Amino acid sequence: MTPIRSARLFIIAATCTALSACGGGISSGGGLSSSAASVADDGDGLENPASIWDVLRRPDANTNVHVNKYIWNASLDVLSFLPVESADPFSGVITTGYGRPPGGGRAYRATILVNDVALEARSLNVALQTRNSPVDVGTARAVEDAILARARQLRIADGRL
């Protein structure tokens, strides 16, 4: 074995040993038994990995998204006049470019955050901006109300009450 190869092997072994020492064991994770699931739930509905190996595993293709689908679709529907620059359903952020509303004179851009699965006002945050400055709070509130009203319409049309 060459000295470089043995040094690499030593570094990998030392790193694994150091990482295993950081874990603290299963018993320090709130009383989980060794047969418990490898993912812990801390009470907020989001799952936290129990070990470093859970982080390194390939993610499941059927991962649940923690975003309300009605608010998400209503946001895209109400602000359809704005060009979508990015949309990430896993983080719940929609970023749009500048666009003019039908019959409007000013160009707006929006950043929408859908941060909960509940169909409630606290699940939606809208930040509007013109080319010069942020818009009035009342305008942003009116857009939020329009999005929530459209989300309720979509939910009723879906037949889930």
Image (cartoon, grey):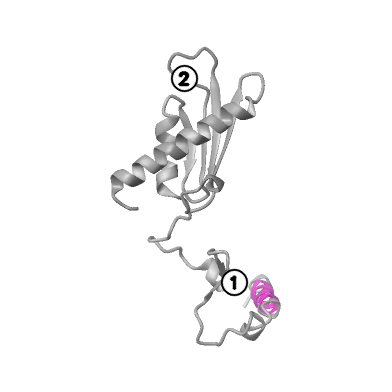
Q: Is residue 24 above or below residue 93?
A: below
Residue 77: which quarter of the image?
top left
Q: Is residue 106 above or below residue 64?
A: above
In this rendering, would 126 be left or right of 16? left
SS category of the residue bearing label 1: helix
Magenta stretch secondary structure, dominant: helix
Q: Is residue 147 above or below residue 99?
A: below
Amino acid type assigned to the residue bearing label 1 in the image: Ile
Which of 120/131 is in front? 120
- The image quadrant where one finds the N terminus is bottom right
Whether residue 16 is in magenta: the answer is yes
Q: Is residue 80 visible?
A: yes
Q: How packed is label 2: few (under 14 Cα within 10 Å), some, or many (20 or more)?
A: some
Q: Position of residue 71 (x, y in %)?
A: 44, 43
At a point 57% along the width and 33% down the height, the residue shown is 141
In this rendering, would 136 be left or right of 84? right
Q: Residue furthest front?
A: 161
Which of 123/28 is in front? 123
Among numbered discs 2 and 1, the one appearing first in the sequence: 1
In this rendering, would 113 be left or right of 29? left
SS category of the residue bearing label 2: loop
What's the CA distance linking mark 2 and mark 1? 48 Å
- Which region of the structure is painted magenta? 6-19
Q: Position of residue 36 (x, y in %)?
A: 51, 83
Circle 1 residue: 52
Circle 2 residue: 101
Q: Is residue 73 visible?
A: no
